[in-house]
Image (cartoon, rainbow, N blue to C red):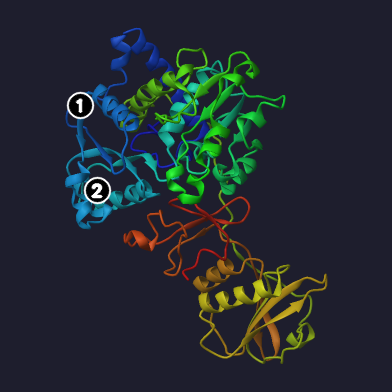
Amino acid sequence: MSNVFKGRSLNIIEDFSIEERRYFFRKVMELKKAILENDQAKQDEYRINDPDFGIYSVFLENSTRTRESFKNAAKFHHAKFSELLTSGSSINKGESYTDTFNTISGYQNSIFIVRSTVEGLTKLLSEETAVYTKRNGLPYTPAFINAGDGKHEHPTQELLDEFTFLEDNDMSFDSIHVALVGDLYHGRTVHSKADGLKLFDHVKVDLIAPNELQMPESYVEKMEQNGFEVRSFSSIEEYLKQPEISTKWYFTRPQLERMGERILQKQEQLRQSITFRKEFLDKLLPDTRFYHPLPRHKEHPTIPVWLDSMPLNGWERQSINGYYCRIVLISLIAGIIGDDFVPSNKEKAEEEDEYIHEVKERKEKKYAEYSEGIKPIKNGLVIDHICKGETPKEIREHMELISRVMHLDDGRGGHWISRSSDGQFKGLLFCPDAHNLTQRDLKRLATVAPGSTLNIIKDGTVAEKYRATTPPRVYDFDDLCCTNEACITHPVNSENVPAKFVRTKDGQFACAYCGRVHSFKEIWKK
């Protein structure tokens, strides 16, 4: 059986399955033991030990711990290690990311470690360099490791966090109860936990932050969809007044400088709510551990330095664990280890691709029989049940968007607000002129108006009727747009990357690059 890890990219934590991560952590534990016991023979089982194997580090955003731990992990492997000095790079002259990384892909580099403020960058690069290396007949396809991208994800930090949790959980995957404390709004390390903590069979998460710094709703919803029990508290003080207190506290640094003058004016109050104080010590449970992705703010640390010498200190071991985890990750992607991993036969069920369903009527119905206030048309299209249950204003605004997206606003026709039999408002858009809809047109309709009904009228009769449901994937439309300006696909980044979306469990659309969740109304260019 081939090594399933070799050549894989890690753009988000979900790129490795739960089963694969559990295998990964067993290997990390094995390597850590070998290093601490100076077992050179066991350590050598993990080494690439090839001076021609290229590992390239590109940090487009400042970093100390992530950059240095990867640098030292790469040196453990006795491989070729290079760093791109971005201060002298042509990226600063307007060169696209794709051109830059395609170029250095050609210099026999197999693994790229990339940190950036641009979200979804490594996913794009893994796609584009695969095409580049194939086009040029190169014998390898580069793999990418996301070392943090904007507010999106930090999957390798999530791996070392999970490993540290496991060490304090007796390596049990059964259950975990974690309190996330601090800036949950900006922190990509806590955002990664919305999917990362699926590693455990039963998960309870307590979110401790004032409203201004609370976890974005999209991540809370994802946690709940993943079966987590989620609770929210406005401060540590409030949290400690209730009986169910976690023994695992994960702190993050408040990034108030990102939030404008209004927030800065109340920063003392905000910091106070998420900073641990001596008066809280006697309220903690035995075996409590504190964690932090670091760095701590030197003037306003949420974990004060007087805690460093106490048994609560789990953050220093957590930081050291980053070295072990990143060594093993590089070993896996290089194919040095992983041959003994045998995945289970459980395969993901294929998503249903049908998004237009023909509705068979029991009898022919004249359009006039169920219209209201509209002159019957002899031939054309009628889109019914648009945004049922919304207000007339919301429905009218969306029907204008449908007309534009479907290119129906160039000819005759109009729209109408009606009431269904249950009294709810619904929209109805009609086009008297004949239209030959392609499969591509139907996908656009299902994307912009899920839940609607398409009636094809011929000679005054509904000749065909279809019901639209949300497609599982949406791409290859020029007028799609992710609303996140930090996303690699957004026009402000000038990378000319077409937007792509995937359907979420609750029927919305998540950007395939940055993960931003949108409604079906929000994914179209203005």
The answer to whether 122 appears left or right of 477 in the picture is: left
Q: Is residue 9 among what the camera can see?
A: no
SS assignment at label 1: loop
Q: Give left or right: position of 424 versus 283.
A: right
Residue 110 placed where, x, y %? 25, 38
Residue 230 rendering spot, x and y as whole percentages:
65, 37
Q: Position of residue 331 (x, y in %)?
A: 33, 27
The one of 117 and 21 positioned closer to us in this rendering: 117
Give the labeled residue for mark 1: 50
Q: Quadrant of residue 467?
A: bottom right
Q: Which residue is mark 2?
A: 101
Amino acid type, callout 2: Phe
Between residues 519 and 448, which one lies in front from this camera angle? Answer: 519
Left or right position of 213 against 40: right
Q: Using a 10 Å C-alpha cutoff, classify the residue at mark 2 as few (fewer than 14 neighbours), some (14 to 19) or many (20 or more).
A: some
Q: Amino acid at mark 1?
A: Asp
Camera-side residue of 242 and 139: 242
- Label located before the other in sequence (1 or 2): 1
